[in-house]
Image: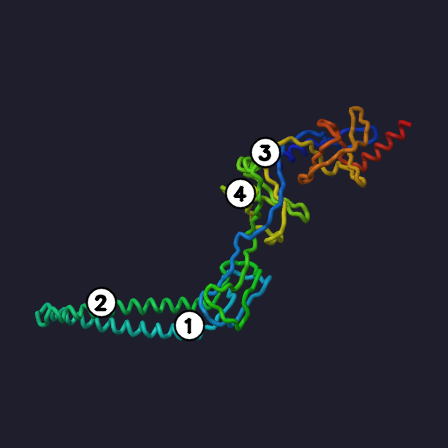
Amino acid sequence: MRSLANSLILFGGLISATASAGETLQTVTSMRVSMPLQYRLDGVVEARQQATLSAEVAGKIEAVYFDVDDFVEQGEVILRIRDLDYRARRQQAGAALDEANANLQDMQLEFKRNQDLRRQQLISQAVYDKARANLKAAKARQTSAAASLAQADEQLERTVLRAPYSGVVVERHVEPGEAVKPGQPIMTGYGLGELRVTAQVPQSLIGGLRQHRSAEVILLEDGVALEVSKITIHPFANPRNHSFPVRLDLPAMDIRLYPGMLVKVALTIGSTERLMLPQQALVSRSEVNAVYVVDANGKLSFRQVRPGNRYGEQVEILAGLDANEIIALDPVRAGIEHKRQLDAAR
């Protein structure tokens, strides 16, 4: 999040070198930083492109080229249906169109002859009208034959099922040799790289989310935060729990996310001030967390603190520390100096 990053960059600039009684220690001044107020809730990863392909013509399956967990490139052939009957129909439709074209040429020539004869008053009006009607019927038969051929071509093309987009097969519903009919499910898959996260946001938080339009998706495995490219808030609430469905679109990435995975969603609903320190200044010993505080005389003291959430390389201090206190950045060197000061005071 840009505002958070800017705050931490400013905070990092406060690091300085302060002289203590023994040796020079690198220190930082604790201070409150204005940061986004976030609320975390569960989210589920889903594919933006997900579909179940169905058979468009009836027939027996000749070959299935992909199975579950296979990656399919856009346009690749997924399945073939036996096409002998459809090829025969296509040939019949092509022959019918050739016949219709030949008949249309004959009717055009006959009409032209009758048109010339009618101008010379050598044939009756009834004969001329008959020739014109024959030409119109021949044109209609030619149009119908062309449509039948186009339909036969389309049905023949539908015996080959191709991937509408690049993705991964998640379910296969048929086997080779199985007879299928139009509308029967064939294969289910989703597009890689086109992912989003869905979450149910409580009614009390939706106003802040609408105002700030900012959120992060946090992976459970390693805590990596992912930027959100688009936030879509449904205009209605679920009447059962009064929460609003929210979709968070993720940009294309190489991280291996899969539909159905659980993640955390951090929604920005306002702003707050947090007392922040670099993570490296924190000392963790068993269940004790502490820092080395440097007073105005350069004396070190070991003070227990209660840390909160981490934000990149920074950690929030919830208790045990006030703003504008000097904290040693290197706990090891500070510990050595602290022991030296205690020994000297005895």
* Secondary structure type for disc 2: helix
- What's under tag 4, amino acid-wise? Pro
Image position of 59 with respect to 68: above or below: below
Q: Label 2 to label 4, Cα distance in Å? A: 63 Å
Label count reads 4
CB under 8 Å between callouts 4 and 1?
Answer: no
Which circle, 4 or 1, is nearer the viewer? 4
Indicate the quadrant where residue 133 lies: bottom left
User: Of label 2 and label 4, which has the lower sequence position?
Assistant: 2
Where does residue 308 sit, x and y in percent of width and height?
70, 37
- What's under tag 1, amino acid-wise? Tyr
User: Of label 3 and label 2, which has the lower sequence position?
Assistant: 2
Q: Which mark is residue 86?
A: 1
Report the front residue among 302 and 29. 302
Image position of 141 with respect to 325: above or below: below
Q: Which residue is mark 2?
A: 136
Graded by Cα atoms within 10 Å as few (under 14), some (14 to 19) or many (20 or more), the crowding at tag 1 reads many
- What's under tag 3, amino acid-wise? Gly
* Secondary structure type for disc 3: strand
Q: Which residue is mark 3?
A: 270
Where does residue 142 sit, x and y in percent of width and height?
28, 69
User: Of label 1 and label 3, which has the lower sequence position?
Assistant: 1
Write the residue at 20% across / 70% down: 134
Q: Which residue is mark 4?
A: 239
User: Of label 4 and label 1, which has the lower sequence position?
Assistant: 1
Q: Label 4 to label 1, Cα distance in Å? A: 51 Å
User: Of label 3 and label 4, which has the lower sequence position?
Assistant: 4
Which circle, 2 or 4, is nearer the viewer? 4
Graded by Cα atoms within 10 Å as few (under 14), some (14 to 19) or many (20 or more), the crowding at tag 3 reads some
Q: Label 1 to label 3, Cα distance in Å? A: 63 Å
